[in-house]
Image: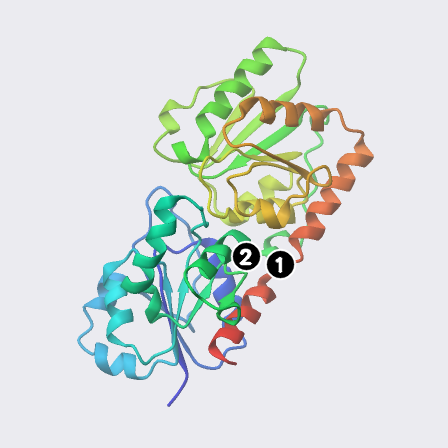
Amino acid sequence: MSKKVVFLLRELSGYFVSCIQYWRKDYHGEVWVVYWPTNQEAPFQWTLDANINWVEKKEFLENDNQDVFWREIQHFFVAGWGDQDYNGIVKEYRRIPKTILFDTQWNPNWKMQLGRFWLYFKIIRHFNSAWVPGNRQLDLATKLFFKSNQIFSHFYVGDQLLFDQPKAKDTTSDSTLNIVYAGRLIHEKGILPLITRFIETITDHPSLNWHLHICGTGPLQNDCPLHDSVTYHGFVQPKELAVILQKMDLFVLPSLYEPWGVVVHEAAFAGLPLLVSDAVGAADAFVENDKNGWVFDQGDLSAIIHGIRRFSQLAPELRQSMSDHSKMLARLVVLDSWSLSANKIIGD
């Protein structure tokens, strides 16, 4: 029987596509990726590897040969525990090794303390292992009764290949401090308060030569205020985002809720100093205070402005040192890290 692995996912993401296509080059079995329809707010465009079977969930579930298909599976991976159709597959095909993928952070409140037992008996007990992005998710995996040898890291990895050819910074306005945010325009990202406070700050202090760049779309886009010192780039494809990031000076992510945040990894690959909230899971891996940026309390807008001002006053050599440190941290986790975890899980 030929080897075959299946990923049951939610929406496709650029970083997942990059990771699995990179890994697939050295995997000598069939790979199937089942996914939800594309989110129209994030119309990513990819060149999908024809050696991988890409199937939308509805089409996959309508296949009449499900039993035959699953008897040939070596391993399958499931994104989270919230899709009831996927949960049904997990429970029905109990003998097949399976791995759960999740980015939920452990929170020691009473709801999660009790909920972990309910979740374990409802679905988690049917999984053999967990594959998570970082330490906060590893803590939850442990609380869900996975043993240390059943937990694997680096499920979310930025694509370093997008940054292998450094782009020259725009030198037409060297005195301008260019700050960039990349993500959806939703409440959880804390983006609207950031834009509002940013505009208030430069209005009160006209001598500040700061410019905020916003990359992304979402429900709040019509509420975002217009200003000469704020540029809205709209939705940008991953390759375009890599070019934009490498022209910036500082990255900011003010999220109120951010289980991980692959864009932090990408900004680090671009050599950007990072200013992110403590809600961002990726901060644990890619931000070291005073070395390549700062982590501030979520919702603390004054801390964000203070961080921008602090960075703006640094000497060029200190800015370069922060940039170099970001690149160093970013390259501790690369596409090969994802491949190594995948191979360990399936026993290759």
Q: 85 or 50, which lies in front?
A: 85
Tally of marks: 2
Q: Residue furthest bottom?
A: 1
| Residue placed under numbered mark 2 in the picture | 157
Label number found at residue 249: none
Q: Residue at x 53, y 34 (%)?
A: 181
Q: Residue at x 66, y 58 (%)?
A: 332
Q: Residue at x 28, y 79 (%)?
A: 70
| Residue placed under numbered mark 1 in the picture | 333
Position in image of residue 116 (x %, y %) = 36, 56
| Secondary-structure class at tag 1 | loop
Position in image of residue 82 (x %, y %) = 30, 55
The answer to whether residue 56 is visible is no
The answer to whether residue 245 is visible is yes
Decide if residue 221 is on the left or right side of residue 214: left
Q: 142 or 347, which lies in front?
A: 142
Label 2 environment density (alpha carbons within 10 Å; few <14, some 14–19, many ≥20):
many
Decide if residue 316 is on the left or right side of residue 42: right
The kind of residue on which mark 2 rests is Val
The kind of residue on which mark 1 rests is Val
Q: Are marks 1 and 2 in contact (CB under 8 Å)?
A: yes
Determine the image quadrant of residue 62: bottom left
